[in-house]
Amino acid sequence: MATTKTTKKTDTAKSTVKKTAAKKETQAVSLEKKKILFVASEATPFIATGGLAEVIGSLSKALAATGKFDVRVVIPLFSDIKKEYRDQFTYLGNLYVHLAWRNQYCGIFSYVKDGVTFYFIDNEFYFKRPGCYGYYDDGERFAFFSRSVLEIMPFLNFYPDVMHCHDWQAALAAIYLKTNYCFREEYQYIRALFTIHNIEYQGQYSLDLLGDLFDIYGSYQYLVEYNNSINLMKGAIECCERFSTVSPRYAEEIKDAYYAHGLDPIIRKNEFKLTGILNGIDDISYNCALDSHLFANFTPEDFSNKAVCKKELQKMLNLPQKANTPIISMVSRLVSHKGLDLVTAVIEDLLQDDVQIVILGTGDSHFEGFFKDLAYRYPDKLSANIVFNGDLSRKIYSGSDIFLMPSKSEPCGLSQMIACRYGTVPIVRETGGLYDSIKPLVNGYTFSNYNAHDMLYVIREAVANYKNKKEWAKLMYRAATTDFSWSHSAKDYEALYLDMLK
Ligand code: GLC
């Protein structure tokens, strides 16, 4: 008996040792995880005005899924954040954040989703307003946000290895890190990566605001000063260890004045630290077999229900239910750089052909009015939906045949990838991420010059090919099965982070 007892005891002791070892191992593994903090102004599923939010939501998830990173994201607590999520946030506490002579309340909320911890910066004065941007004090709002990102680190006891800042709204986080905070030891190991999603929006302000609003010391003025103004994107590019943009082609393009909105000399000067990584999309969310927004589900192997999606879409939009008339769609912000100058120049020619055209989006009132007028004049051929509607967008992606995206410039573009996932063949201009993701006759159609008649020629070519059902089905299959998941690009970010941490 005694022997048995001893054995049991020894066994228990052994298993305790084992358990402790296992625990230590898990701790060691999690300690080894590199800590990444995304700083951005929006993220799906909480709040989205465009592609940036989708990338923040889906890339953070993909990186966390590798098991190699402790990924956290921080965004402002805008009042438009969906209530269904907001009600589930945990209040962690609050602190006061200094910004020049200001001393502002900063509440911190958190929520864990798909292995990613999201933090929300609460300040009702700055963020309890409809929408995300477009206020007279946006500079101050995002300066407060960026400053808060650095201030909550000691509170959370979380100092990332890489602070990954996205677009101008988060540029100041990288700038403060390397200026005002550079003598504080705990911040000295943080590397900054700055990603440009769109170089058009740079955060430009009068130099008078340097100290009083942005709280940047005069000795650092040279970092943010550009063309006699403060330029926050320029400042982040100068301050960060590395910067990136959302496609390899766009990384090349922004060295050129045609694409850079004035920043090309800065891009060229810092070229040695620039990388272009193509965005992916969330291939679970955009899955024609599972998407509950569709009128009917289908697969790349069996597109027969896509005809149901088309018929129901035509019915919903009051278009004649013609199965063999191709629907050409555009889901886009209605702004000039999306190629709308080309579209407005030749759309009436195109409307003479046997086609139907569906437009979804909001933007410049000039374009909104233009499409409304066309819909009035061609009620059987064109449907203009001047709204931002996620549900309708998926019904359009799945129910149309051809997707038009003739952008003048396009850092990456996600819509062409989403269209492909639903077997809708894209026609794109060869620029930025459109060039990197769509290959002529492999998974779509392309044209290279920003020219309306070049575009019209390719649209007519696609419409003619559409009549050849057998070949068209093969093209749809290739489009729908192109791999646009994060699997490749998440690896590229992983390599970039590790390279930065060498
Ligand atoms: C911006 C760009 C778009 C890109 C998106 C996500 O919205 O205009 O091309 O896909 O950011 O990176």
Image (cartoon, rainbow, N blue to C red):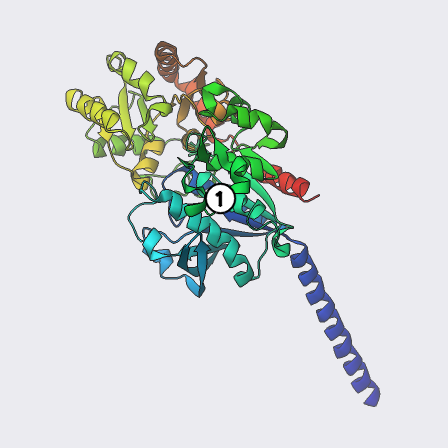
- Residue 421 visible in the shown view: no
Q: Secondary structure at mark 1?
A: helix
Q: Residue at x 31, y 53 (%)?
A: 128
Residue furthest to the bottom in view is 2
* Quadrant in the picture for residue 453: top left
Q: x and y percent of residue 73 in the render?
A: 50, 51
Ligand 1 lies under 8 Å from the Cβ of mark 1: no
Label 1 CA crowd tier, 10 Å (few <14, some 14–19, many 20+): many
Quadrant field for ligand 1: top left
The answer to which of 174 and 10 lies nearer the viewer is 174
Q: x and y percent of residue 345 in the render?
A: 28, 14
Residue under pointer 1: 172
Q: Residue at x 62, y 56 (%)?
A: 186
Circle 1: residue type: Leu
* Quadrant in the picture for residue 109: bottom left
- Residue 273 visible in the shown view: yes
Quarter of the image containing the N terminus?
Answer: bottom right
The answer to which of 280 and 118 lies nearer the viewer is 118
The total number of labels drawn is: 1
The answer to which of 150 and 498 lies nearer the viewer is 150
Q: Is residue 357 above or below residue 18?
A: above
Quarter of the image containing the C terminus?
Answer: top right
Relative side of 245 to 48, left or right: right
Q: x and y percent of residue 181 in the render?
A: 57, 51
Residue furthest to the right in view is 3
Q: x and y percent of residue 156 in the render?
A: 53, 61
Q: Is residue 491 above or below residue 353?
A: below
